[in-house]
């Protein structure tokens, strides 16, 4: 059975990328990718999302829970689009785009739980996006 690091390495090689190139694409450190592949760094939820989005595979595939790569479903398409933002065009990296998504998801959850009002939600959302 392949480890998480093996799967990341194989996906990276399929894209003909070095560890350094993948790190640059994702806006994370080279040593982080190296650590993931060697099993030295634990894959965080955020790292898992970033890699699965970048490689267009399910998180379960990366975690070894399935051998089917399973492309992203429709609910994850917005995250995929944000993650593939071209920083030269938009001025933000894939990592920054995912930061925005993470923050928005938290604010939406707070609003749905009734922890903040609609006005507070809109004000916070505007600050995150700006």
Image (cartoon, rainbow, N blue to C red):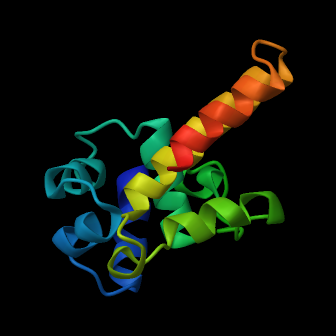
Which of these two is toward me, 81 or 5? 81
Q: Position of residue 27 (x, y in %)?
A: 29, 60
- In this rendering, the answer to whether 72 lies above or below 97 is below
- In this rendering, the answer to whether 63 lies above or below 69 is above
Q: Quadrant of residue 13?
A: bottom left
Q: Which residue occupies 63% across, 59% down?
A: 79
Q: Which residue occupies 48% across, 57% down?
A: 97
Q: Residue furthest bottom?
A: 16
- In the shown orientation, is residue 88 left or right of residue 109? left
Q: Position of residue 122 (x, y in %)?
A: 72, 36
Which of these two is toward me, 104 or 3? 104
Q: Which residue occupies 65% across, 33% down?
A: 123
Is residue 46 visible in the rendered image? The answer is: yes
Q: Position of residue 64 (x, y in %)?
A: 56, 51
Q: How many marks?
A: 0
Which of these two is toward me, 69 or 125? 125
- In this rendering, the answer to whether 116 lies above or below 102 is above
Is residue 2 visible in the rendered image? The answer is: no
Q: Residue furthest top?
A: 115
Q: Position of residue 77 (x, y in %)?
A: 71, 66
- In the shown orientation, is residue 1 left or right of residue 109? left
- In the shown orientation, is residue 50 left or right of residue 35? right
Q: Quadrant of residue 109?
A: top right
- In this rendering, the answer to whether 120 lies above or below 79 is above
Q: Which residue occupies 24% across, 68% down?
A: 24
């Amino acid at each position: 059975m392949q480890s998480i690091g093996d799967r990341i390495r194989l996906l990276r090689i399929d894209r003909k990328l070095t560890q350094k190139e993948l790190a640059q694409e994702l806006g994370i450190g080279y040593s982080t990718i190296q650590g993931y592949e060697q099993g030295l760094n634990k894959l965080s939820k955020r790292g898992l999302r970033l890699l699965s989005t970048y490689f267009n595979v399910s998180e379960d595939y990366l975690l070894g829970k399935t051998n089917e790569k399973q492309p992203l479903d429709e609910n994850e398409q917005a995250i995929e689009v944000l993650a593939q933002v071209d920083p030269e065009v938009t001025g933000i990296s894939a990592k920054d785009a995912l930061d925005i998504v993470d923050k928005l998801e938290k604010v939406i959850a707070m609003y749905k739980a009734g922890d903040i009002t609609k006005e507070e939600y809109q004000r916070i959302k505007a600050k995150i996006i700006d």
